[in-house]
Image: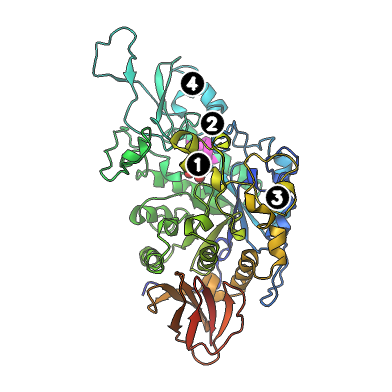
């Protein structure tokens, strides 16, 4: 049995709550320039959680009821990677507003009981950050050692002939976005490291001055009352001290784009070095100084390495993001295995979490192959043991956007092939049926999806069985159910095509039955007399009783209250 009894009392907000990711460029534009902004987030806070404390279970609530929002970066940035190239960690890009708007957002969110988590991008800055501008001035600049500079590796054909370059990159590492991870700075004759685009030079976290400066960045935002940070590629901060070559990956996909050096290597030396945990402990100590704050990390390594990011005794991240379910095929037993492996591996101090969508992956509804599956996924995400993170628009079942090649913005799509573009999951939020889906009065920075006139917040709010209303019901139901937000998890062997688990806190028992296939299933459930359906993903059989033989329609999930 992989579950352990967890008291549902005394949970922290980041354990009990639901996180909602906002990609600010795409949420709501209030200035009429086609790009979303922080005022847009403020204007839509009531949609996310209007602060009403009414724990309604029978009526469809008007607001989604999320507990925290995570904002992707809004700092000054040349936008080479849409804000993940930060030119000033302690300000707001004028495109999104200013610090006063940010403070107002924090205040307005807190007034509604919503926590604010911001993105912290510690691995790299923009090449326009003053630190890098200094650093690249000369080899003896005091900021030179703030980044990772190396001499060229002499080419084998030395002595070189006239016109030949002096040397090649310092090692064989590839960039996630294609090509080598090194760019030569002609003026100073050395290469600098960047595992994303060349406009994202990597900070040298082995330098204590960098650590100090980057800890000050955290302090700056903690003082402004943010409740937590989502730490971008935090496992990359420390690289091998000798920067050794990565070995080739024998299982690399033969169809990789020719410039995808990254995909052809095993990532042994460029990431996940043991010394990174010292830094993470420093982050944690700082967060703890400020009380009830939360450190979330973007960490995608295999389970045994990933788990270390919680710390040996819980002195690491509160929540290293768990992306594992996103990598499973849409099969009941595959999902169950992934959850059970996690449950079995987690030490008692470590709190689980699940992510099904983000600004880096194709849309959930498209990945799973349909709206019915997306509804089952919503029920799974919001009923597993641990903190769920929702991605904006998934509550509407938004599908991958269709981006004409000339409109592709994402460097990953530009460098590695149109099919790799992350623009598909960054299309504007669909608020209503007016032009541009109510997102903006101007042409949006990415095209609005064609289905916006029928798939939007206004239309779905009026439809009692829409996926939006399913999300609302699930969130509000979860909020008042100790079994769901804090209880134990126990999987049950019932039917290979169904993922079935019991959540329990004290006497409260909730059985979740998720049918993963496009055919009806009949399952026997272990309830005594009086058990009833609380929610079906179809939103049409609430209160149904006599469940000893439970009929599930194709792609249907149900939450059952066991008596
Ligand atoms: C993370 C972000 C991604 C970004 C990359 C570089 O993976 O989620 O959007 O491109 O880091 O910062």
Check the image and report above or below for 296 versus 65. Answer: above
Q: Nearer the viewer, mark 2 or mark 1?
A: 1
Residue 203 image point, x, y percent: 46, 33
Which residue: 66% across, 36% down? 93
Of mark 3 and mark 1, the one earlier in the sequence is 1
Name the disc covering residue 167, or none: none
> Where does residue 132 sit, x and y in percent of width and height?
51, 26
Q: Considering only order in the chain, which callout, 2 or 3, is on the residue closer to the N terminus?
A: 2
Q: Where is residue 305 in the image (x, y as percent from the top left)?
A: 35, 52
Name the foreground residue: 31 vs 520.
520
Q: Mark 3 against mark 4, which lies toward the viewer?
A: 3
Residue hosting label 2: 126
* Mark-to-mark CA distance, 3 and 1: 22 Å
Asked whether residue 465 is drawn in magenta, I would say no
Q: What element carries label 4?
A: loop
Left or right: 561, with 45 as reference point: left
Q: Which picture quadrant has residue 423? A: top right
* Image disc number at residue 421: 1
User: Sequence-wise, which precedes: disc 3 or disc 4?
Assistant: 4
């Amino acid at each position: 049995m992989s579950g352990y009894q967890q008291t549902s009392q005394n949970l922290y907000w980041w354990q009990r709550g639901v996180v909602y990711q906002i990609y600010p460029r795409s949420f709501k534009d209030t200035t009429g320039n086609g790009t979303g902004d922080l005022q847009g987030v403020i204007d839509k806070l009531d949609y996310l959680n209007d602060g009403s404390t009414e724990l309604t279970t029978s009526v469809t609530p008007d607001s989604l009821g999320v507990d925290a929002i995570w904002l992707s970066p809004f700092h000054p940035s040349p936008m080479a990677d849409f804000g993940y190239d930060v030119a000033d960690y302690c300000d707001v890009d004028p495109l999104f507003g200013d610090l006063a708007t940010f403070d107002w957002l924090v205040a307005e969110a807190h007034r509604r009981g919503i926590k604010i988590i911001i993105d912290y991008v510690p691995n790299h800055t923009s090449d326009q950050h003053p630190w890098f501008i200094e650093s690249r001035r000369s080899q003896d600049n005091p900021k030179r050692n703030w980044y990772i500079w190396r001499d060229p590796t002499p080419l084998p054909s030395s002595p070189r002939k006239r016109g030949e370059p002096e040397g090649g990159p310092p090692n064989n590492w590839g960039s996630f976005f294609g090509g080598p991870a090194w760019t030569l700075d002609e003026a100073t004759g050395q290469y600098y490291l960047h595992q994303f685009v060349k406009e994202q030079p990597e900070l040298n976290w082995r330098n204590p001055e960098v650590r100090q400066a980057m800890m000050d960045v955290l302090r700056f935002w903690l003082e402004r009352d943010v409740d937590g940070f989502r730490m971008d590629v935090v496992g990359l901060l420390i690289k091998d001290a000798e920067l050794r070559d990565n070995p080739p990956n024998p299982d690399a996909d033969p169809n990789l784009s020719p410039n995808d050096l990254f995909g052809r290597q095993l990532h042994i030396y460029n990431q996940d070095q043991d010394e990174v945990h010292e830094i993470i402990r420093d982050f944690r100590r700082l967060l703890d100084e400020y009380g009830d704050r939360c450190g979330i990390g973007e960490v995608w390594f295999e389970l045994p390495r990933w788990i270390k990011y919680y710390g040996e005794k819980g002195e690491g991240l509160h929540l290293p993001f768990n992306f594992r379910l996103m990598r499973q095929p849409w099969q009941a037993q595959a999902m169950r295995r992934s959850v059970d492996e996690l449950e079995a591996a987690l030490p008692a101090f470590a709190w689980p979490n699940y992510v099904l969508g983000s600004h880096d992956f194709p849309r959930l509804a498209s990945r799973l192959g349909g709206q019915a599956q997306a509804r089952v996924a919503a029920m799974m995400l919001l009923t597993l043991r641990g903190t769920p993170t929702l991605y904006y628009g998934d509550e509407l079942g938004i599908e991958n956007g269709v981006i004409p090649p000339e409109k592709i913005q994402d460097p990953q799509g530009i460098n590695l092939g149109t099919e790799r573009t992350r623009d598909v999951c960054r299309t504007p939020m669909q608020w209503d049926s007016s032009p541009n889906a109510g997102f903006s009065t101007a042409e949006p920075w990415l095209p609005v999806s064609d289905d916006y006139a029928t798939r939007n917040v206004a239309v779905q709010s009026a439809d009692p069985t829409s996926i939006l209303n399913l999300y609302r019901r699930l969130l509000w139901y979860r909020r008042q159910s100790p079994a769901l937000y804090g209880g134990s998890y126990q999987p049950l062997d019932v039917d290979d095509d169904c993922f079935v688990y019991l959540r329990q806190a004290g006497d409260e028992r909730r059985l979740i039955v998720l049918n993963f296939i496009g055919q009806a299933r009949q399952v026997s459930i272990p309830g005594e007399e009086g058990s009833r359906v609380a929610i079906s993903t179809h939103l049409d059989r609430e209160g149904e009783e006599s469940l000893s033989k439970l009929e599930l329609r194709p792609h249907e999930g149900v939450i059952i209250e066991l008596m």
